[in-house]
């Protein structure tokens, strides 16, 4: 969607971030990682003090800012059929300190919700009304494998700004779009990066990339998957899976939903809720027949969709390597192992 | 601990070799530090993968709900109680299950470790009998296991399995914390405070149903929240949907929940489900003098009727 051309590079002192965010807060609603109940999630913030900079990654992705888990698409009084469209965004938004993998996942969702065949007005309005201020990962985790699926801890793609913590009280900021540049203009205490800042940046970038130790070989994977749809491998890999919604709901690229109409005495609402292929009801047909009868078929669907169907349709893997499914699966199902097993099959 | 693991592997191997069971369900090491995970073993050779330690946090009983084979299962105290429940409620047959009981001094609550880590990544963890060493970049910290034990385990009175075919390892002492102290403390708060608490907890729920799927007492082929003809339940994130899901599930497990804590541990958004469940457990104890899963004989109170059942609540 957007090109990661370098427009402007600056240095922001850490202690100036608060002032900058305060200024931006006049025009934007700012969402940033906040730690509550021992959990790091994106929340709207009113002061930089709330931002939890020290995060590895957020538990949930900021996906629901664009594609909420549950939303009323429209509602109408029972008597009238006329559609009432509600304004979706009251104010433009900034997602502050989004990780590069999560930014990339939005580009994958764009293919689904903003394609030639189909434009989802709800998604598009949110997407267009939201700027992405990235925070480079200086501490990629053991479960991260972004570099295997086209990303990287300092990847600039799809961001408006990328910030990197130089570790000495300074952030290196790079504007990647005109809108990103506009955000920088609101900051009057910017400094020009010096040679040593650039050197530092190159160094931490290299170190971070090296830390992404997990590798996932996806080359030729979709072809392999074509051949093993009926393999006994699927009998093995799903065994301990509980069939819950964690891996798909926390995944930044999963985008399945179900539509539902709800009514009370006066109004009817059409609601869109997230759905997951790991749930038995996902494929129950009106007759009661369920073609994906057990966890075996459901696990296969999840893997096939990410590494085969999506690739076939959009040319990219529907996984950005954020590792959330690995971290949060209650029974430690590890997509890296599954892929390895498939490759060895 | 290592002794116990060795014994466990031998027992499991023998069961498979002698064809007493078709399948062993136990724990193996996982792919991340701190993590173990369920393993399904059909070949005697594979039993060397079995582990037993205070990181074996999953309840394996949930797998009994669907398996048809003769199973040898590794069961902690709470798990043995869940198995009793499943037998009593005719979900599994006693003769199809070989219970390998493991006395348990409490399971480590990973969420407590996350609090210690404060955003740092755990790269390695080394477990000894009483301590855990956490290692990461610029991090090396020894923590007493006692401080990390899950709330359910702290007050557990059945750390030694109640029902088993063979016991592996030595019996341990019971939990020391007063069983309902936290529930009582919570119950003493005002209605508003409690209501706010539950609403706040439920507001984080993402309806992934991991809590229900892992629960040994939740075995309905189709849960009320999933039914679509008719649809009993909205699928939104409105508290009237999420909170009601939890309240109804809590009632459905009344007199059946053994406080294994598995549901709280799997929740990805740290919802403290235990407070709801424990309160109902306390009520069942007070009203019917019944505790779930401590013997095979006593009839479950929600499945029986006695002329002298308390009925003050019927107005
Ligand atoms: S793989 Fe893990 S997170 Fe995903 S459905 Fe299975 S148990 Fe749940
Ligand atoms: S499949 Fe797992 S690793 Fe890949 S994007 Fe989804 S949550 Fe992240
Ligand atoms: S089919 Fe499954 S894996 Fe694919 S997007 Fe939907 S929920 Fe995710
Ligand atoms: S409700 Fe929770 S604590 Fe009770 S038996 Fe089920 S999983 Fe265990
Ligand atoms: S595991 Fe947690 S988030 Fe998932 S449904 Fe249960 S309470 Fe909600």
Image (tube, coloured by chain):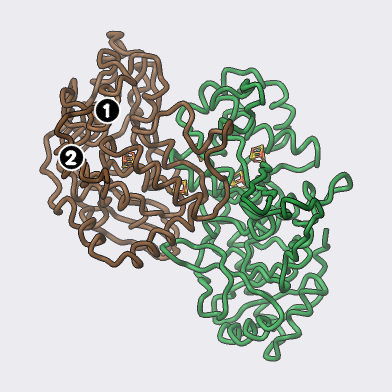
Chain colours: A green, B brown
Residue pictured at 45% horizontal, 66% vertical: A36
Q: Position of residue A309 (x, y in %)?
A: 74, 34
Q: How many numbered dots are placed on residues in this image?
A: 2
Q: Secondary structure at mark 1?
A: helix
Camera-near label (2 vs 1) is 2
Query: Does residue A151 lie above or below A36 as drawn?
Result: above
The residue lying at 56 percent from left, 34 percent from top is A279
Q: Is residue A149 visible?
A: yes
**Quarter of the N terminus of chain A within the rendering:** bottom right
Residue A148 in view, yes or no: no
The one of A283 and B309 positioned closer to us in this rendering? B309
Q: Are marks 2 and 1 on the same chain?
A: yes
- Going by the image, does A224 lie left or right of A295? right
Q: Of callouts 2 and 1, which one flags the residue occurring earlier in the amino acid sequence?
A: 1
Quadrant in which the C terminus of chain A appears: top right
Q: Residue B140, which numbered label?
A: none
For this orientation, the residue located farthest to the front is B315
Q: Residue at x 66, y 51 (%)?
A: A147
- Residue to which mark 1 is pinned: B303
Where residue A149 sits: x, y (%)? 69, 46
Residue A28 in picture, x, y percent from top left: 69, 77
Q: Determine whether A196 is above or below A303 in the image.
A: below
Q: CA distance from mark 2 to mark 1?
A: 15 Å
Residue pointed to by mark 2: B310
Identify the chain of the residue marked 2, using the numbered disc in the image. Answer: B
Residue B31's quadrant in the figure? top left
Q: Nearer the viewer, residue A216 or B274?
A: B274
Q: Is residue A116 left or right of residue B289?
A: right
Mark 1 CB lies closer than 8 A to ligand 4: no
């Amino acid at each position: 969607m957007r090109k990661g051309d370098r427009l402007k590079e600056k240095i922001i002192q850490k202690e100036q971030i608060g002032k900058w965010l305060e200024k931006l807060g006049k025009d934007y609603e700012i969402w940033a990682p906040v730690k509550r109940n021992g959990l790091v999630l994106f929340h709207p913030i009113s002061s930089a003090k709330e931002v939890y900079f020290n995060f590895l990654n957020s538990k949930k992705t900021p996906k629901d800012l664009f594609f909420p888990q549950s939303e009323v698409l429209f509602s109408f009084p029972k008597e009238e059929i006329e559609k009432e469209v509600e304004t979706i965004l009251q104010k433009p938004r900034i997602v502050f300190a989004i990780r590069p993998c999560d930014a990339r996942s939005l580009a994958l969702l764009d293919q689904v919700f903003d394609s030639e065949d189909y434009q989802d007005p709800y998604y598009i309005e949110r997407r267009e009304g939201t700027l992405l201020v990235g925070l480079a990962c200086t501490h990629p985790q053991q479960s991260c494998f972004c570099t295997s699926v086209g990303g990287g801890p300092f990847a600039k793609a799809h961001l408006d700004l990328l910030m990197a913590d130089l570790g000495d009280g300074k952030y290196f900021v790079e504007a990647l779009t005109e809108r990103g540049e506009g955000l920088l203009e609101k900051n009057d205490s910017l400094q020009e990066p010096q040679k040593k800042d650039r050197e530092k940046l190159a160094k931490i970038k290299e170190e971070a990339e090296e830390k992404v130790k997990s590798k996932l070989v996806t080359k030729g994977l979709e072809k392999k998957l074509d051949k093993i749809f009926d393999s006994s491998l699927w009998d093995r890999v799903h065994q301990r899976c509980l069939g819950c919604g964690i891996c798909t709901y926390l995944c930044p690229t999963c985008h399945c939903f179900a539509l539902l109409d709800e009514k009370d005495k006066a109004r009817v609402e059409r609601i869109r809720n997230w759905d997951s292929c790991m749930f038995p009801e996902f494929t129950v047909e009106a007759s009661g027949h369920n073609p994906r009868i057990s966890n075996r078929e459901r696990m296969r669907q999840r893997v096939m969709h990410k590494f085969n169907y999506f690739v076939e349709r959009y040319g990219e893997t529907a996984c950005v390597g954020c590792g959330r499914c690995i971290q949060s699966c209650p029974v430690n199902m590890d997509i890296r192992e599954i892929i390895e097993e498939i490759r060895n099959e | 601990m290592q002794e116990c693991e060795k014994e466990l592997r031998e027992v499991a191997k023998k069961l498979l070799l002698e064809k007493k069971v078709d399948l062993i369900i136990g724990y193996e090491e996982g792919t991340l530090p701190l993590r173990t995970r369920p393993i399904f073993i059909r070949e005697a050779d594979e039993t060397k993968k079995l582990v037993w330690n205070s990181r074996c946090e999953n309840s394996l009983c949930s797998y009994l709900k669907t398996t048809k084979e003769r199973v040898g299962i590794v069961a902690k105290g709470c798990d043995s109680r869940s198995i009793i429940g499943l037998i009593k409620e005719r979900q599994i047959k006693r003769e199809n299950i070989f219970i390998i009981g493991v006395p348990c001094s409490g399971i480590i609550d990973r969420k407590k470790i996350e609090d210690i880590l404060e955003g740092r990544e755990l790269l390695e963890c080394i477990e000894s009998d009483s301590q855990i060493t956490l290692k990461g970049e610029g991090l090396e910290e020894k923590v007493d296991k006692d401080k990390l034990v899950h709330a359910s385990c702290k007050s557990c009175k059945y750390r030694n399995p109640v029902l088993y075919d063979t016991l592996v390892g030595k019996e341990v002492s019971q939990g020391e914390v007063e069983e309902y102290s936290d529930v009582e403390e919570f119950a003493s708060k005002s209605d508003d405070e409690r209501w706010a608490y539950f609403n706040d907890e439920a507001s984080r729920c993402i309806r992934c149903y991991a809590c229900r799927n892992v629960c040994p007492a939740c075995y309905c082929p189709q849960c009320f929240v999933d039914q679509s003809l008719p649809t009993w339940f909205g699928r939104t994130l409105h508290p009237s949907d999420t909170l009601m899901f939890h309240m109804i599930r809590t009632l459905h497990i009344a007199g059946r929940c053994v406080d294994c804590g598995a549901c709280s541990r799997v929740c990805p958004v740290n919802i403290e489900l235990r407070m709801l469940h424990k309160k109902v457990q306390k009520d069942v104890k007070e009203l019917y003098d019944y505790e779930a899963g401590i013997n095979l004989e006593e009839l479950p109170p929600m499945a029986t009727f006695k002329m002298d059942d308390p009925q003050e609540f019927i107005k």
